[in-house]
Image (tube, coloured by chain):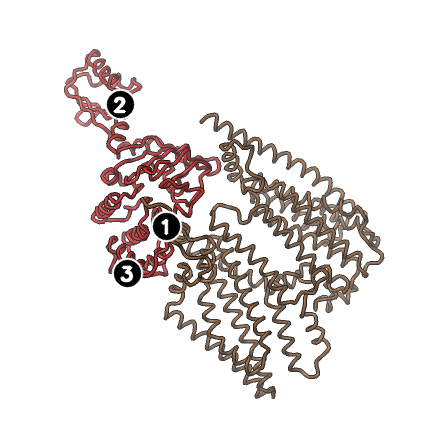
Amino acid sequence: MSEELAIRTIDLRVDYGETVAVKSLNLEVPRGEIYGLVGPNGAGKTSTFRILSTLMEPTYGEVFLCGIDALLYPADVRHRLAYMPDLAPVPSDLRCGEFLEMFAAAHGLRGKEKRDRVEECLEIAELTEKRNSMCRTLSRGMTQRLVLAKSLLHKPDVLILDEPASGLDPVRRAGLRNALRDIAKDGRTVIISSHILTELADMCTSVGLMRRGLLVDSGRVDDVVDRMGQKQKRITIRFFEGLEGAKRFLDAKETASGVEIQPGGDALQFSFSGGNEQQSELIAELIRNGCKLRTFQEQQSTIEEIFLELSGDDEGGQEAE
Amino acid sequence: MSDSSEQPQTVSSWNLWRNPIFRRYCKSQLRPVSTAIWAITVLVFTTFCFLMVYIGTTQFGDSEPREAARLAMIPVLVIQGLILMLIGTGATTIGYVREADEGITEYQRLTPMKPLAKVLGFLFGLPIRSYLLVGLTMPFTIFCVVKGEIPMRSVLEVYTMFFVSGILYHLTGLLAGTVLKRRLMAGVLSMGLVFCINFVLPAILRRSGYQFLFYTTVWPVLQLHGSGLMLDSVNPVPTELKNFNADSISVQFFNWNIPTFFFGLIVQGFLIFTFGLIIYRKWKSERSHLLSKNFTVLAYSGILILFLGTSLPLMETGRIFPSMSTQFGQNYMRPLGMQGSFPEGWGLAGFCGLVTLIIANILIQIVTPNRDGLIKGLRRAHKENLSGPGFGADEATALWHTIVIAVLGAVAWFWFTDSLFDSKWYDDHSLPGHAFFLMLPVFLFATVCFVCTLQMSGKGALWMAMLFAWIVPLLAAGVLFAAKQYVPGIYLTSPSAFAAFFSSLAILLDGPDFENLKHLKATFWIWLALHAFLSLLLVAMLQSRQSQLKHLILGESGRD
């Protein structure tokens, strides 16, 4: 097992009865990456995160964190990871400082080292002044930051964050982004899921796209957007004349979908799923059919549009998360 | 990136003071204001009760301070018992469920602490306020011990048993919190269980074979030392009290006499180990069954050994019979001529068999996988090129362990019934040599039908099947008996496994003939034929479902 990989899963599968939540997941995340896992609800992200964090056993498959078999040695792996769930909860009967101290002690920190680390993490989360406040009195955003502080206590090698930015205002989100970048700079790995995809694209060095339990694509953010965008481009053609005929022609084409006349009535917009050759052939055919083209604009999908495309495909066919 | 050698050392499981979970509850449960309110309340009531008894008996009862101090020990013990057992158990359960409810349990799961350290942290941390409050009442105890000259051995035994019972009930609370996810339900259930274990179950089961359940409480040790103290202070000693004290000193277990205190420790230790193991397993893996299949067979054997060991010695003295042991029996059953009579023995043997079956089915229910579990096990086995999950795995069928449990239960039931009818009370009756071979199918078919239905169709379907096959016929028969329609009523009981425990004995025991005996005997043969057929059918269906699931998995991997 390569030590360069912080996370590696081999043929991972999770079932809930007859529903397949994760199917043949082969995930490889190098150390020092901020890896975003993207997918609609029911894609299998949370199940994957729970398995990576040793909270759940897969039906089968292998999981390695920092080269350690997480299914065989969960206690060893727990020293090296931190998991922050969606809607991160905090105990209602403890003060913020007590909460952090308990988990610092649970990770083996003692005495001055423990106190210093708790202060350090409170500072990172900008919660130093809330040290003696009861956890239940914190706002949603503060709660998220407190749990993030808890996750950083033992300086984990791998940070697994499920929707960490939800509940944070834009300023705090920028703070979180910077904090995660600093963590990654130290050689630590962050795997994150979020629905705020522009943030994710901005924050992550690489992403994985999940749909119906399968990893559809994975790699550097630009590469994935490029690949997925190539598969599904948005094309706008403005015509001098022949728009109606062009619409009929495109409606009949398998590679074109969602053909719409644009406001103004002189342009068509559609999704194109063919390759470059097919694209130039399509334009030539339009011209041969007597359409007079004014402008041609190719628009590659953003990660947000890819996500929407994935979600749209899943409508009515959602599976367990 | 750090390697394993750099991992910080987590706290040792037994070092409670450094256990982060224990310390966390020391902080949250012992906040000064709420602790002060609790402490003042407890001290006010304890002082009141103590003074009422102590001053009352010296002023109005003309007792010596020594006797008054001994009597005043009783309300102190009651208050301590309430705090430790009832309030402590409630706090343990509610706190444990709240932790899961709020989602903090997941954080705890992810810490590298050992599962045992986590169990101990919760077990001693959650009821910490109860321990403190009991500690605050200890000056009253010390006064009573010193002033009342109570022997130190009595004090140590009573308080050791208090502490051990407290641990057992707090573990019961953790268990309720593990099984039930709703705070209120879990709290009510655990406190209800403590009440039942102390007051209801012993009354029902104590003199009906399951005598050992009485030793899950502090009562035997309290009785022993309470009567001992009174013997010491009353002069002349009434004969009943003398006998009572002699009975309380030791427990007859098979042919051994075990001191009551130690026997209580053995019984409670057995339950503490079992409950602790359940919680430990759940901390190790959230989705695992409460008990492993192999341990369940061992636990059932342990229960049967305790049952037989404590019930068999009671037979010769006749104290196994309700009519000869309890006040209810003395007042109501003896005047009806039910003393060691044939119907009483018959009823007792049937009842013991029935309770043994119910315990077996509770344990079987724990280890039976649901459909999800079965599918998961088959997928995993298929991936590893195995024919199925391992024999003892949670995902494996529970059928084979059920058969072992059924055989053990049948052996215990046969042993009990045979010993009962071999005793001096039944010179005219005895079980025939072939009895075991008729008692075994009763146990076997009842448990096999239970496990097959549960494994194939789930708990809801099992309950409906049991309701309509085993319970409704009995209720309908009751209505017919009320209408004096005895013969149809008797035949209506024939599908019920509960009735089979009694009707089978009608065949085996050569009892006095009565009008409808032949009909009662006939119902057993009907039950046997019906359940033999059902068992075979259900086992065949179970195997067929298992192959269907295997084909489903194979089909899936083909598509992959």
Q: Specify the chain shown as red.
A: A
Observer-side mark, 1 or 3, equals 1
Along the horizontal axis of the image, is B306 left or right of B272?
Answer: right
Amino acid on which the number 2 mark rests in the picture:
Phe
Tell me which residue sits at (30%, 31%) in the image.
A309
The total number of labels drawn is 3
Residue A185 appears in which quarter of the rendering? top left
Q: Colour of chain B?
A: brown
Residue B525 appears in which quarter of the rendering? top right
| Chain of the residue where label 3 is placed in the rendered structure | A
Q: Which residue is mark 2?
A: A272
Question: From what the image shows, is residue B140 above or below residue B385?
Answer: below
Residue toward you, B154 or A144:
B154
Amino acid on which the number 3 mark rests in the picture:
Arg
Marks 2 and 1 sit apart, C-alpha to C-alpha, by 53 Å
Q: Which residue is mark 3?
A: A131
Observer-side mark, 3 or 2, equals 3
Query: Do callouts 3 and 2 mark residues in contact (Cβ within 8 Å)?
Result: no
Q: Which residue is mark 1?
A: B7
Tell me which residue sits at (64%, 34%) in the image.
B540
